[in-house]
Amino acid sequence: MLLIIIELVLAVGIAFTNGAVEKHESIKEMMRDAVLHEENKINLFGLAVNPSLVAGFVVTAIILLFALIVRIFVIPRFKNVPGKFQLVLETWVGFFENLAKTNSPHSNGFLGAYIFATGTYVFTGTLFELFGVQVLTTEGHSISLPAPLADINGAIMMGCLSYLVILSGGIKNNKLRGVGLTLKEFSLPLSMSFRLFGALLSGMLVTELIYFTLGLSILLPVVVGVMFTLLHALIQAYVLTLLTAIFYGEVSEPPKPKEKKEKKSNKEKTDGTPAEAMQEA
Amino acid sequence: MILTGLPLNIDFQQILLHLANFAILFVGLYILLYKPVKDFMDKRTAHYKSLDDEANEKLANAKEVEEEYQNKLKAVDDEIEDKKKAASSELDSMRVEREKEAKENAEKILDDARKEAESVRANIINSASKDITDMVSQAAEKIFMSDDINKAYDVFLEDAERSVKDGK
């Protein structure tokens, strides 16, 4: 029901605003800029930054404001038998906590909190691009803010930070062995960063392509924009947190006791030496 | 910047800004949302676990009491069984004693009856010999009273023979 209402509102918004915004660049330029962020910069306290960074700040502010309101007005009224909103909050927290516990049973306190924040940031940040918040570039053009992680810098930060968190888990639980285990997966930060960047960027590009084509921009974005964005927001949040949890669990697992030597000695005891076998024969 | 000119416009300054932004978000979310909700859930879990433990403890106590009760019932059953056996053996011994008593009584009655029969017989015999004597004396009187002495002797001899034949 809520989804239908959102879609209707967006449909009306798109219908009324379509053509109102002057397109200052071609599709080629726009897509190139979405990948490279060379043209459209935003002035942030005198610093020219990519729009995704501003989007990241806005998303953080929104999430923290929401969390503050929940902390002040909702959490003190929590009941043992939860209501609908409490249930949503508990499911949200419980999902990441369980994900951490399942994949890293030996150490998961910090991991749970980290993947909760990561998942929330990725999900909310990806949904944020749906709202098309308009800002002015340094050149005076109006652009809509993209997802914070559709920027290569944001994705690199997230991938490398996740890798550092995994490394910290290895050091905390296995000391030098943990470092070795983590460094063994040296391609992880690169793969995590570019996977995230590629996934979010491709989603954005497909949506932009559809928006750009006039014939498709009346009703189709309502389905494509909302449904696709919702879906890949969920998937990306899940994939990143799951990967982090799995690798964290792997490097923080205590070493198994060596059984090879014992097995070998047992085998010798049961089989006897070759000379004894010859004698028996 | 030293690291400008990296491919894909990678900018370390912006990466650090993204990092700072996420760090703020992480700390804020942890303090405002994750920890309070998790604490509440843990507290509730502990509460229900304590209730569950309490219920289990009560159940264990109830089972213990039930077992005790069953043991007592069994003990009572055993006691009843023992008493039944004792009563049965007592009854048997009483029956045997009664039978013995009855036999003794019967023998005594029989003895008494025999003795009484003996005495009755003796009395009958005594009275019969007295009758015979009376008859003999009457016959003798009749003979002496008659004239024919020979007849008297014959009668006397016949009586005497008869009494010898009777064994008296």
Image: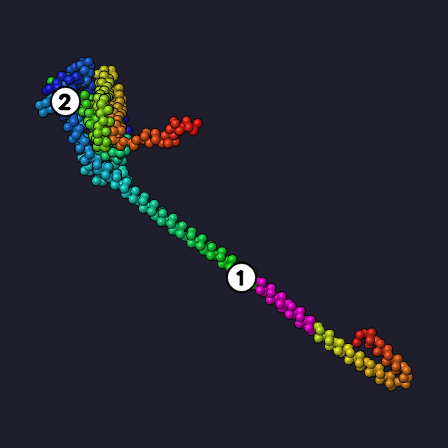
Mark toward the start of the polypeptide (1 vs 2): 2
Task: Say which amino acid is labelled 1.
Answer: Glu
Crowd rating for badge 1 (residues with CA inside 10 Å; few <14, some 14–19, many 20+) = few
Residue A94 vs A43, above or below: the answer is below
Q: Is A134 covered by the magenta stretch?
A: no
Tags 1 and 2 on a common chain: yes
* Magenta stretch bounds: B95-116
The residue sitting at 26% across, 19% down in the picture is A220
**Residue at 56% from the left image edge and 60% from the top image edge:** B92
- Sort mark 2 into few (<14), some (14-19) or many (20+) by Cα contacts within 10 Å: some
Q: Quadrant of residue A26 in the image?
A: top left
Q: Residue at x 18, y 15 (%)?
A: A32
Query: Which residue is at the far front?
Result: A279
Q: Residue at x 90, y 81 (%)?
A: B151
In the image, which is nearer the foreground, mark 1 or mark 2?
Answer: 1
- Chain where mark 1 sits: B
Identified by mark 2, the residue type is Phe
- In which quadrant is the N terminus of chain B drawn? top left
Q: Position of residue A99 (x, y in %)?
A: 27, 31
Quarter holding residue B2: top left
Q: Position of residue A228 (x, y in %)?
A: 26, 22
Report how far apart the C-alphas of labels 1 and 2 lie in the structure.
Answer: 109 Å
Observer-nearest of A59 and A263: A263
Residue B148 appears in the rendering: yes
Q: Which residue is mark 2?
A: B12
The residue that label 1 is drawn on is B90
